[in-house]
Amino acid sequence: MNTTGAEQTTVLVLSSDEALRGSIESLLGEAGLKGRVVESGHQALDAVTSQYYPIVLIDWETDALDGKGLCDAIREWPSSGYVYILAAVDRSQAESMERSGADDYLVKPLEKIDFAARLRVAERIIGLELAVSESAEEVMLLALVDPVTGVYNRTYLSRQLPQEIKRARRYKRPASVILASVDKSDELRELHGRIACDAALIHFVDSVGKNLRTGIDWVARAGENEFLIVLPETPPESAEILAERLRRVASEASIEQEGQTFTYTVSCGVTGFDPERTEAEVTMSGLLSSAAESLKACEESGTNCVKGGRL
């Protein structure tokens, strides 16, 4: 039987009946699955709250905690994945299983063919639930990513930057941002087309990525030809050094796109703060406005330069 995930599926088995436990363990082994056996409902709760079991098989006759109560408790616990609950019941209980909280049931005594078939269904359902969950995460990520350059978009920027500011203020750590703009993008688009302009943006983003600290710094597209590079734990003077490095890499690049070769430049407005020396309240709008003023100073100086400021 196929299992979900790279590791062999572990089935949590709850039964106080020694003979039934032995039968289930034997059937699980024939199905190629591992089983962990517990004898009481409280032991089962301890197990599911400490480890993820994709399949839980409950003997409805177990003492200490009734089957429905255990189902409800498992459903309420914030598991890392969907838990498929199978109930082992007497034939007289089968008709009452619809509102039990279990996903499916097996009639005792357990039969090998029926047991294997029910487990295959359980694994298929778990696999589908996993695929849906991963798909939802991918959709959420796509909603926060710029489709052209692959960096975060304005939505992510609006959510995350205030948190970075709050964290820096709380722990009294410096933080800086670089507002970088591809110079004269309209002229670049007119001369070489939109695809070439996008190639320049992508080239710049790639160079930025090579100079950022993984898991600490991040970059988001802030406008049509602008990117905000967020640098936690970085004072403004260090951010200016990085900005100059990025500016130089861009100015020295030569890009080939659809038979054309062209160059481009960037300007960078840098700003930041050190909570040890900055008493004023820092906001996202204030930080962005300061960076934008520095970038405007670049444009007034003829572009292809770096200008810095402080809050």
Image: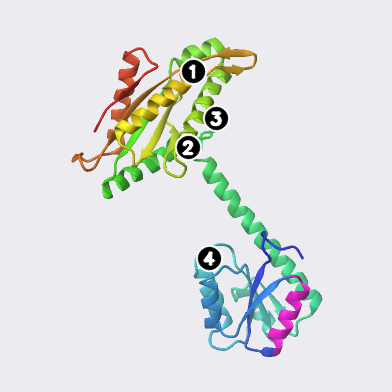
Of labels 1 and 3, earlier in sequence is 3
Q: Splitting the image into 4 quarters, where does residue 110 fall?
A: bottom right
Vertical side of 280 occupied by 5: above or below? below
Write down the region rendered in magenta.
19-32
Disc ID at residue 252: 1
Vertical side of 170 occupied by 236: above or below? above
Disc ID at residue 8: none
Q: Distance of mark 4 from mark 2, alpha carbons? A: 29 Å
Of labels 4 and 3, earlier in sequence is 4
Tell me the quadrant of the picture where the C terminus can be found.
top left
Q: Position of residue 300 (x, y in %)?
A: 31, 14
Q: Which residue is mark 3?
A: 148
Of labels 1 and 4, earlier in sequence is 4
Residue in the foreground of this view, choosing between 267 and 193: 267
Q: Distance of mark 4 from mark 3, alpha carbons? A: 36 Å
Q: Nearer the viewer, mark 1 or mark 3?
A: 1
Q: Nearer the viewer, mark 1 or mark 2?
A: 1
Apparent side of residue 204 relative to residue 125 in the rendered image (left or right):
left
Vertical side of 165 occupied by 25: above or below? below
Q: Which residue is mark 4?
A: 79
Apparent side of residue 6 relative to residue 30 in the rendered image (left or right):
left
Q: Dot 4, how many residues are within 10 Å of its Cα: few (below 14), some (14-19), or many (20+)?
A: some
Residue name at image x 63 percent, y 84 percent: 15
Q: Dot 1, how many residues are within 10 Å of its Cα: few (below 14), some (14-19), or many (20+)?
A: few
Residue in the foreground of this view, choosing between 35 and 42: 35
Q: Are marks 4 and 3 in contact (CB under 8 Å)?
A: no
